[in-house]
């Protein structure tokens, strides 16, 4: 183990659906019938070597088709928490994106419960949650998601963020969402600058 692995750490920006260990994601791909483009774990790793931001988005979206049931979220939450704990990370603020999976018939509250169930199985690390709402779905839709999140706030949901197509959906369109989130006692955060810089992106803390 290197000195860096040994020292206790915090992880302040990580996405649950983007941090699934390769072997766990491969299991999910198999669960849903497999995918010819990824016959083994090595080819899955190759699938996630990006050449551009749009390539990253394509891979991100492709992977989401293998997250359809509540148990999938419990599974990835536990595996991801184990992975973080193994790196001697003691505390993490973990984004998750409930809005993206409502199309599979999941609801936000049960999805959050499923995530917490998986996280709770790993005692070595404390993990709080930030729900990353989706600009592209519009403020009205995400206000509904926010009201659902309020009911599961005690599951360690400390904040909300917005991500997605920032050029088409600038932050001005989400003033009410942010006001409501503050009123409910959530911290707020926004992904910004990702589509103008070639590197991995800039994340801006808007308030609190
Ligand atoms: Zn992020």
Image: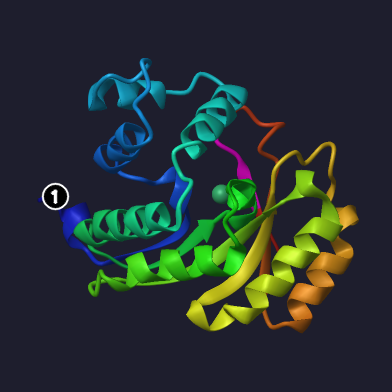
Which quadrant, please, contains the C terminus?
bottom right
Towards the viewer: 85 or 205:
85
Above or below 40: residue 167: below
Above or below 30: residue 177: below
Decide if residue 128 is on the left or right side of residue 121: right
Give the residues drawn in magenta, as a range.
Answer: 199-203
Decide if residue 35 is on the left or right side of residue 196: left
Residue 42 lies, in percent from the top left, at 24, 23
Report the residue marked by disc 1.
2
Residue drawn 24% across the image and 23% down it: 40
Residue drawn 59% across the image and 56% down it: 98
Residue 201 counted in the magenta span: yes
Helix, strand or loop at label 1? It is: loop
Visible in this render: residue 208? no
Classify residue 6 by image quadrant: bottom left
Residue 179 lies, in percent from the top left, at 83, 73
Visible in this render: residue 135? yes
């Amino acid at each position: 183990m290197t000195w860096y692995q040994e020292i206790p750490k915090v992880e302040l920006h990580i996405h649950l659906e983007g941090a699934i260990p390769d072997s766990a994601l491969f299991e999910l791909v198999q669960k849903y019938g497999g995918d010819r483009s990824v016959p083994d774990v090595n080819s899955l790793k190759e699938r996630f070597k990006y050449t551009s931001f749009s390539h990253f988005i394509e891979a991100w979206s492709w992977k989401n088709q293998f997250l359809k049931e509540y148990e999938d979220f419990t599974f990835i939450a536990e595996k991801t928490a184990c992975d973080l704990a193994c790196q001697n990370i003691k505390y993490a603020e973990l984004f998750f994106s409930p809005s993206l999976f409502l199309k599979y018939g999941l609801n936000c509250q049960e999805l959050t419960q499923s995530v917490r169930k998986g996280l709770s199985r790993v005692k070595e690390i404390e993990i709080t949650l930030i729900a990353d709402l989706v600009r592209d779905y519009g403020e009205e839709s995400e206000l509904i998601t926010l009201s659902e999140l309020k009911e599961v706030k005690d599951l360690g949901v400390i904040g909300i963020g917005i991500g997605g197509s920032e050029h088409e959906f600038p932050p001005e369109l989400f003033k009410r969402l942010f006001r409501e989130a503050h009123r409910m006692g959530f911290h707020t955060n926004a992904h910004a600058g990702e589509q103008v810089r070639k590197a991995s992106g800039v994340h801006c803390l808007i308030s609190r």
